[in-house]
Amino acid sequence: MSNDGQPAQDPLIDETQVEQRRSAAARLFDIRRVIGGLFVAYGIIVTLIGIFDSRAEIDKAEGVRINLWAGLTMLVFGLLMLLWQWLRPAEPPAPNEHQPGA
Amino acid sequence: MDGDGLRLNMNGLDYLILALYFVTVLGVGFAARRAIRTSVDFFLSGRSLPAWVTGLAFVSANLGALEIIGMAANGAQYGVMTVHYYWIGAVPAMVFLGIVMMPFYYGSKVRSVPEYLRLRFNRPTHLLNALSFAVAQVLIAGVNLYALALVMQALLGWPLWTAIVVGAAIVLAYITIGGLSGAIYNEVLQFFVILAGLIPVTVIGLVKVGGWNGLMDAVADTKLGEAGLHAWQDTGSTANPLGAHWIGIVFGLGFVLSFGYWTTNFAEVQRALSAKNMSAARRTPIIAAYPKLVIPLVTIIPGLVALVTVQGLGAESGDLQYNNAIPLLMRDLLPNGVLGVAVTGLLASFMAGMAANVSGFNTVFTYDIWQAYIRRDRSDEYYLRVGRWATVAAVVIGIGTAFIAAGFSNIMNYIQALFSVFNAPLFATFIIGMFWKRMSALAGFWSLLLGTLVSLSLYLLYKGGVVDFNSDLEESFWGAGLAFVTAVVVAAIITPLTSPKRDEELRGLVYGMGGVDLKGDVLAGDAVWYRSPVLLGLIAVALAALFYIPVF
């Protein structure tokens, strides 16, 4: 490769770039699973609270069954996150760490 | 109202929701640990993250302590004009960062924003910026922590020191263990939890006042009056709620302040540097611009609802300060259940802000201070260890500053305002250095130093009563503008008198010098049109302009 394509070199940056070839970043889990899981749990809890809401609680929220609606919305959102992860799993890590030389 | 003031009536289920969140946050930190083997894994997530993750973390890092509470307060105090902080005061700068500046940041493989200054100019410029950034970050982390503790004290009745230590311990744990991946993943989670907390308040608030039209009619009858409903209409003079002329809004807020903050603040840019390739890095701030466009719906609308529904809002002190707009609505409108989610969202926002400061600090401290000036040529494992200890130190110092802030809360607010003004000369130095290859290393140093001194002096003269401005906001417009001009003039004078850097040293750092490869690491899916950074950025700016039409 001609020198034109490369940015200016710096010893400190080059050192960490070399070390980066043994990166463990590929072992990072997928955050969609955590977001999905937490929101499904929140959805179930808040929906159940909403089902058993008393008149006083509904009146406090200006007559809106906010727990029910918010709970169901969070539940659906959480399930969509999990569905997204299931349909489009994370891509395998890009193989640029294995390029010979720096 | 009862005598407990802001105290919320939380029950066991609300606390269950809060506890679930804390457990999840810690779990994310521990689970991210196995992905850390090198220092880049710890400080930059191994440059491996997809754009939607870094983009949401980018916006979440800014959704910190003073942002949500503060913007709702501004909404109640200044009305619809508060949207300027989002649509002209953020979105254009975020798009500019992604399209124009990110190729130099990401392409040069620098590990931090100060490091760019080391390569582009010289070590003194670098050290000046690295030190001021590091000091600012721990101080602001302390302010965030103190604000978090104040809210926990007011809403939950926790003693101040318990709240400070608990908040700090959680942030400390997940960043020390999980590194930047722990911070970024939690920021993405926080983004959704914050929204889940704010949307119910907004919806019920709107129901209470009779929808959008009801809100507009009611605001017109308050002390803000008709002027509270327009963003631009009265800006031909300073006789509007914000006290700002349109020139000040466009150039002061929209250009100097906003570009200074968004394009040079490493706590933000770090999220983009952790993206997996150039395309993802460029899309990071642009993806973040889309939530930024609509966040005013869940901050300014609650602020306005509080203005019309809470009698006596706007007191100088006590429970009815503007800053309590959102907590007051939560108390009055949310039943148990969504209340727990809202409290969780609020606490999440405070931790997001502090975590961004801490993870920015540990990277700059390790790479830009320790490795560059104190202990060079050690192993990568050594710097990884330094980073973990720097995190501990940052949080401990943050606790210290939080307790100082408890005694001098006004002074800490000033410090925050002060550091935001520091960004203007930094931005000037960056933007000239990126586009004018002749600008010399010495010019970079003096531009940054003198620009900073000018904004600092004006600020101190204003606070000392020597110079007079209509508002703090007007002072910051002028301070930032003057600092920017100073940096430009200094660069123009010193550059011809000093020797330039050699062309090959500037490759990849300066416009027109080559060395920036926008397509080299592109993945198969990134070439599609809807992932084009330029197209996405232009749509975001166009939407920001369109959103102004209904509230002109």
Image (spheres, rainbow, N blue to C red):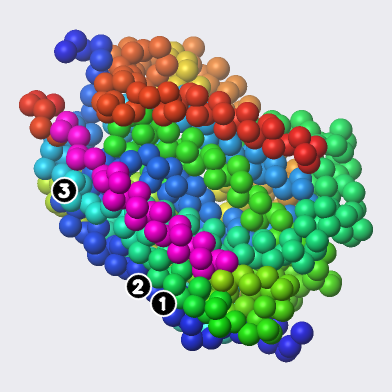
Residue B511: in sight, yes or no?
Answer: yes
B39 sits left or right of B81 in the view: left
SS at mark 3? loop
B151 sits left or right of B109 in the view: right
Q: Nearer the viewer, residue B150 or B61?
A: B61
Q: Nearer the viewer, residue B435 or B541?
A: B541
In the image, farthest residue toward the front = A51
The answer to whether tags 3 and 1 share a subunit is no
Tag 3 residue: A24
Q: Residue at x 40, y 66 (%)?
A: A40
Q: Which numbered mark, 3 or 1, is in the foreground of this view?
A: 1
SS at mark 1? helix
Residue B150 percent coordinates (x, y): 58, 74
Q: Which residues are magenta?
A: A69-96
| Pointer 2 with pointer 3, Cβ within 8 A | no
Residue B19 badge: 1
Q: Main secondary structure of the magenta part?
A: helix
Which quadrant would the N terminus of chain A be assigned to in this image? top left
Q: Amino acid at mark 3?
A: Ala
Q: Amino acid at mark 2?
A: Val
| Pointer 2 with pointer 1, Cβ within 8 A | yes
User: Magenta segment: does it hold A85?
Assistant: yes
